[in-house]
Amino acid sequence: MTKSAWMVLFTTLCAVPVAAPALAQEEAAKSEIPAAAPADVQSIDAIMAAVYDAISGPAGPRDWDRFRSLFVPEGRLIAVGRNREGQVGKQVMEVEDYITRADPYFSENGFFEREIARTTEHFGHIAHAFSTYESRGSADDPEPFARGINSFQLLNDGERWWVVTIYWEAEAPDLLIPDKYLP
């Protein structure tokens, strides 16, 4: 048997015993997530638009069940930025952590985030999208107060699209969005 044949056999044998219990656990966890509107999860375009729509609006409550319905049970939101000393760090949040942090702000402040450009890579059941965004306090603000890139990792389980991770960094004076990620 060739080395590559052994690697295929080894990988297959290692994955099969682990996959069945993991899939059963995943299905149980998915049953605890609010049901998604089919239109929100039918395509990459739809799920990304739903994420932006779910967090955007005038001051007041958001439809957090809609937001929850878009993510796998283990979904993560990860903000990257610099602290006051200029050191780069990250804030890793589960979906509920994000809701807990964002809800008080959104209750008191308008927040409208929209995608202005996207670069997508797609293979099999996975997709990655660099989604350039603009954020405004009001839908009719002439200029955004922030711009940046949301890096979406998405999964299609054969029935719908899921957000696995949204990983983002805001633009800064010394970190401008490259032209290739702008409209």
Image: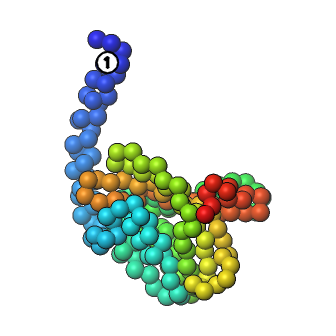
Instruction: Please give the residue where the numbered disc 1 appears in the rendered image.
Output: 6
The structure residue drawn at horizontal position 36% and vertical position 53%, both measured from the top left corner, is: 155
Above or below 22: residue 8? above
Q: Which of the 4 image quadrants contains residue 33?
A: bottom left
Quarter holding the N terminus? Answer: top left
Give residue 169's position: percent from left, percent from top. 62, 60
CA neighbours of label 1 inside 10 A, class few (<14), some (14 to 19), many (20+): few
Give residue 105's position: percent from left, percent from top. 56, 80
Residue 79: in sight, yes or no? Answer: no
Q: Amino acid at mark 1?
A: Trp
Q: Nearer the viewer, residue 181 or 161?
A: 181
Give residue 99's position: percent from left, percent from top. 47, 73
Q: Residue farthest to the front?
A: 183
Q: Residue farthest to the top?
A: 1
Above or below 69: residue 2? above
The structure residue drawn at horizontal position 66% and vertical position 76%, both measured from the top left corner, is: 144
Q: Nearer the viewer, residue 47 or 87?
A: 47
The structure residue drawn at horizontal position 31% and vertical position 71%, both measured from the top left corner, is: 39
Quarter holding the C terminus? Answer: bottom right
Q: Nearer the viewer, residue 98 or 69?
A: 69
Q: Which of the 4 image quadrants contains residue 130?
A: bottom right
Provide the secondary structure element on which disc 1 rests: helix
Residue 31: in sight, yes or no? Answer: yes
The structure residue drawn at horizontal position 73% and vertical position 54%, both measured from the top left corner, is: 87
In the image, 126: left or right of 134? left
In the image, 135: left or right of 16? right
Give residue 102's position: percent from left, percent from top. 52, 75
